Image (cartoon, grey):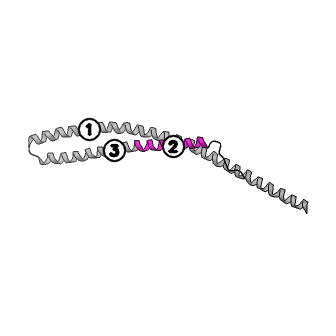
Amino acid sequence: MKKFSFELEKILEFRNFEKQEAEAELAKALSKETEIKNNLEMIANQMIVSNQSVNKSSSFDDVIAQSRYKNLLNYQKDELLKELAQANLVTEEKRSVLAECMKKTVALEKLKEKRKEEWKTACDYEEAEEIDEASNHLKSVN
């Protein structure tokens, strides 16, 4: 019995490679989003600490310094929000690319399974034919 061979195996391997690359790219994009969200959380915590400092301070200079610091934090927050919006777009694009790669891979894998089943059926048929021939040959010899 001959070994099963899928004529599109190289293409399937390439599609799997593309899928792995797309998964890696999506992971990078998600990592970037997480980094930005962590920075936003850090700024929010710094804002809370700054507000508490202003409430405890009686010095005008401290209040002015805290006000400037809060302005800086607000600026950083706004910039991070812009980066997050851009990162979200990149992530969605990477998700779309991955979905397309998965669709192509799944289609080829299904075709491979179908061809393998057809091959198995053909092999089973050939084996049954050989058994019948051998049986008929034995009957004719006796």
The mark total stands at 3
Ranked by sequence position, the earlier of labels 2 and 3 is 2
Image: 119 above or below 88: below
Q: Name the residue under label 2.
A: 19
Please tell me whether mark 2 or mark 3 is closer to you in this view. Answer: 2
Q: Mark 1 points at which residue?
A: 76
Mark 2, Cα crowd under 10 Å, few <14 / some 14-19 / many 20+, is: many
Ranked by sequence position, the earlier of labels 1 and 3 is 3
User: In the image, which disc is placed on residue 35?
Assistant: 3
User: Which quadrant holds residue 129?
Assistant: bottom right
Q: How far apart are labels 1 and 2 at the CA level?
A: 36 Å
SS class, disc 2 = helix
Please tell me whether mark 1 or mark 3 is closer to you in this view. Answer: 3
Q: Is the magenta stretch mostly helix, strand or loop?
A: helix
Q: Which amino acid does label 3 sit on?
A: Glu
Ranked by sequence position, the earlier of labels 1 and 2 is 2
- Name the residue rendered at 55%, 41% in the picture: 14
Left/right of residue 34 with respect to residue 94 in the rendered view:
left
Please tell me whether mark 1 or mark 2 is closer to you in this view. Answer: 2
113 or 64, nearer to the observer: 113
Provide the residue span drawn in magenta: 2-28
Mark 1, Cα crowd under 10 Å, few <14 / some 14-19 / many 20+, is: some
User: Which quadrant holds residue 107?
Assistant: top right
